Amino acid sequence: MTMSRFSAGYFLGTKVLLVITIPVVINFAFLLYKRKYKNLKRKLGLELRRQEFDLEEDFTFCNSGGKSCVPLRFLARQTELIRQRERNTQIWTYLREPRLIWESLLVLADYIGADVDNLTLIGNATEGTSAVLRNLTYKSGDKILLCREHTYSAVVKQAEVVVEINPGVEILYLVLPYPVRCSDDIVSAFANVLTENHDIKIAMLDHISSHSTVLFPIQDIVRLCRSRDVITVVDGAHAAGQIPLTVEEYGADYYVGNLCKWLMIPQHVGFLWVHPSRHAETRPLNVSHSIFEPNFRNRFYPPLTQDRISHILVKDALEFQEELGGLEFHVARNSQLLDRACAMLSEAWGTPLLDVAEECRSPLMACVGLPPDLAEAYPDMPDWTVKKTMNGDLLMKGVAIRVTTIAGKFYCRLCCHVWNDWSDFERVRDVVLELVRERRENPWTGRLPPAYFFPGPFAEVATT
């Protein structure tokens, strides 16, 4: 009887304790989550810039699609790894580095939805597209399909080199009509050009265009190309870190991407995904000891003297993204900020945004028309020179954006990343209007700037 009463009392006490404890634990966990969420929300923008980056003061970085900013923790990790390498280059080269790179490949494969056996790390996306174009064999009459005003300029030049060394091969340009009302407009444009041209060997496709920021319905386009036996190369230089990727599902022959833009890894790291049917013919342009390796990935790791520290930082980058709330969180925050900024700039400059349906817009890059007076202040110059000179003038004023031309009009390509806040876009607005006033009073009459804006020579040009 006593035991029975004890048992009943024990179970009753346990039940009461659970009833009291469970809500307390749930509330405590919720408060911790809420506190973490608020801190993350607070950290993005200026506070994050001060805590995690060592960026030049009084300079506005809104061109992460061109050159990103690298967190201090990545630079510290990079320095640590360099010191490890130099303490024992033999152990590093033959034992440690291969293992660390393999670990990077595993986490990257999971992040982009790829089979690791189809994946290799390379210097950048342009290195990947060049290797693909130069590895293929061509015959007279073959056509390379590019998209005018969307295909990256370096890829256009790569195609021009292929044409130069392969007599009879031609470049065919698809012209995408504006406005783009929906993704079906893009697919229809590709369907038309593929129907009218039966000699297209390879299509160079953008996932997100560097020039126009248009987000292409890549899976539908690839499916269409494959139905016509057209080889597909997807340039995803701006995709990783902006949108979720499922590379294996796209069905392309090749997919290239960068990790030094939106994932903020120090420069010289990208990836090349190759369909299994293309492994045998895929080789790097740099011919070295491993060129005949049976595994295509191993061919891309000559020579042993190249610095591949940035290839090891993939895991660090993905962990940092999660620390900031994950891809979905910071893309939502940055895209909302970018939308507001574009509306503000459009009103201040009296110019439209590029007329593209929302489903076809990059989440973290956008094009806003520049004031017509600005372009007119650079007379007697071809468009590419005007763009380069405008970019240089803006850099000298402490603003990094990208000037681009689409359908004969000049646009500001604007990017928004985790370090940006509202004041950055207000500065872009004010500096562009200031440059308009200055150039209206003093049109550009200086000599052409150098290909790259070194401080000495360009400082003299900018004051002309």
Image (tube, rainbow, N blue to C red):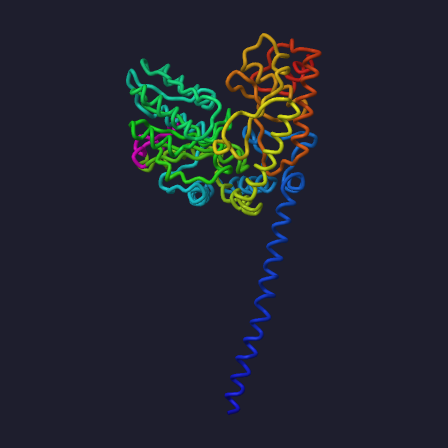
Q: Residue at x 45, y 33 (%)?
A: 257
Q: Which residues are magenta?
A: 276-292
Q: Nearer the viewer, residue 315 or 14?
A: 14
Q: Nearer the viewer, residue 189 or 76?
A: 189
Q: Is residue 325 left or right of residue 225?
A: right
Residue 309 in sight here: no
Q: Is residue 88 above or below residue 145?
A: below
Q: Residue at x 59, y 58 (%)?
A: 30
Q: Residue at x 64, y 44 (%)?
A: 43
**Is 271 included in the stretch rendered in magenta?**
no
* Residue 31 occupies quadrant: bottom right
Q: Main secondary structure of the magenta part?
A: loop
Q: Position of residue 239 (x, y in %)?
A: 48, 34
Q: Is residue 46 above or below residue 186?
A: below
- Report the residue that reaches farthest toward the front: 181
Q: Is residue 171 left or right of residue 350?
A: left
Residue 48 in sight here: yes
Q: Position of residue 448 (x, y in %)?
A: 60, 11
Q: Position of residue 452 (x, y in %)?
A: 57, 19
